[in-house]
Image: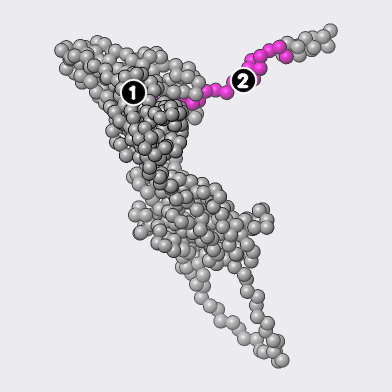
Amino acid sequence: MKKIAVLFFALLLSLMPLHSVLAEEPDTQPPSDVEGLQAEPLDGAVKLTWLPSTDDVGVEGYELHYGLTPVTESGQVYDNVLDVGDVLEYTVTGLENGTTYYFSAIAYDAAGNESLHWATGSPLSATPEATYEPLEEESPQVSDAEAINKEQVLVVFSKEIVLPEEDPQDAFSIENNEDFTELVVLEAEMWEEDETNRTALLTTEVQEENVEYTLTAHISIRDLDGNPIISGTSDTAVFLGSEVEMEEVEPLVVLKAESIDSTNFGVTFNKTVVLGIDPYENFLVHAVDDMTDTLDIMAVVLGENHEGTEDAFALIRTSPQEDKTYLVTVLGVTDEDGNPIDEEMNTASFEGPAVPEPPDVEEPEEEEPDVEEPVLPDVTPPEDVARFLANTFLRMDELVVSLTWNLPVDPDWDSVLQRLYMSADLGETYAEEAELPTNVSSYEVEGLEPGEYWFKLTQEDAAGNESEGVVTKVTLVETGPGLVGLLLVSLGLGKLVSRRRSNVRAD
């Protein structure tokens, strides 16, 4: 009987849906911030409209927040909150004419996750008036199109527009007016040089010189009020194929690497580089004949290359090198425009310095008498620490800089004091921040204003010799609700601070 019961239970489990046996992962992804919030004052009311937010699962609805005082700082809240459901417009009634009200909005999903920031452009103000006439809505139109080279076209609209978030290139089509073939649009983005956000930059297949093309913008392009282009009316423009070749961007490459001494080597680039958050991870060094024979990166400092280009040379301190050939691979760095390093030209080899053999010395025929060696003064500074890193975290709505480092493991390390310095002028001058015991490998700095700070940690021995030190730097931005919201959402607590968010957007 027991055996029959076991078989029946196993059969029952096999028929159950998989999702009933395995627990689903909780949804912790918040919806995107509300964009395109607009306010139209009416008689005793204000009509609000906005663009739809996005979410990995789906937006459940929206909350409107309003009051007589704008929310501009973290911790402030609006006087009134309305859950208006899954709509893109709502009229707030019961308002006093002649009184200015401030509005904002957030989106939420079914799991209770909310947008990390207030709606873009908020707080938005509006003043109801008894004699106010409703605004006439005007759809965007294509004003002009021009090929600036053989592979790029500028499209100008009559008003500020928003491109689709997914596959924006599909919002445009281009046709050759001579043979009616399609000129494929490869990429589409807003043109950064137009601060009015009325111009889109398209990247196309190579155009035929002086051939007439017709460009059509589709209804997925909308203005900030959510009004789409009306198909068939002013949604096209004609342009001529350009004869200008598209300017090629010079790739970022490694020119050479060379050993400087047994614990330092240099890497020369062809242009200015921008290191990653952890510069120690940007350089991988190993012996050419053995990938497991690696060098530890102790410090990275940028400087001018041989042509005088700023930040195009990296001086790298390593663990001791041997008399062998090393290969350095550069990863995760970009040029000033954000273009990544060329993966086919991001390596270079260099020779570790040869250790000279001691010269042959003939033994003296007669043994010389023992002479007591004079005691020379200690003039060698202690060895510096490794992996000196700076990170930031929030504590009570204030950014704190956390410094960490690895102490040398050499038993003969003779440091008796660690000195921490700080610079607020990009390393031009340093002021002493703290004196630390030699068993300390971390330190926190509080109360700093937004800006870039450089920190230098040196070692001092009993004779007063101070090492050159290691340097790290960190940039502090304005604190805001984005950082706090992101931390709380990751803990499942996003709902608790949904009313205490700033209108400052996180970058």
Q: Could you say whether the residue bearing mark 2 is in a helix, strand or loop?
A: loop
Residue 46: percent from left, percent from top: 25, 15
Residue at image mark 2? 23
Question: Looking at the image, is mark 2 or mark 1 nearer the viewer?
Answer: 1
Residue 209: percent from left, percent from top: 39, 39
In the rendered structure, the answer to whether residue 321 lies left or right of residue 88 reads: right
Q: What residue lies at 39% left-to-right and 23% top-to-bottom?
A: 218
Asked if residue 249 can be seen in this view, the reply is: yes
| 163 versus 314 height, above or below | above
* Image quadrant where one finds the N terminus: top right
Residue 25 is a magenta residue: yes
Q: What residue lies at 27% left-to-right and 15% top-to-bottom?
A: 47
The residues colored magenta run 14-33
Q: Quadrant of residue 205?
A: top left
| 486 versus 138 height, above or below | below
Viewer-closest of 117 and 327? 327
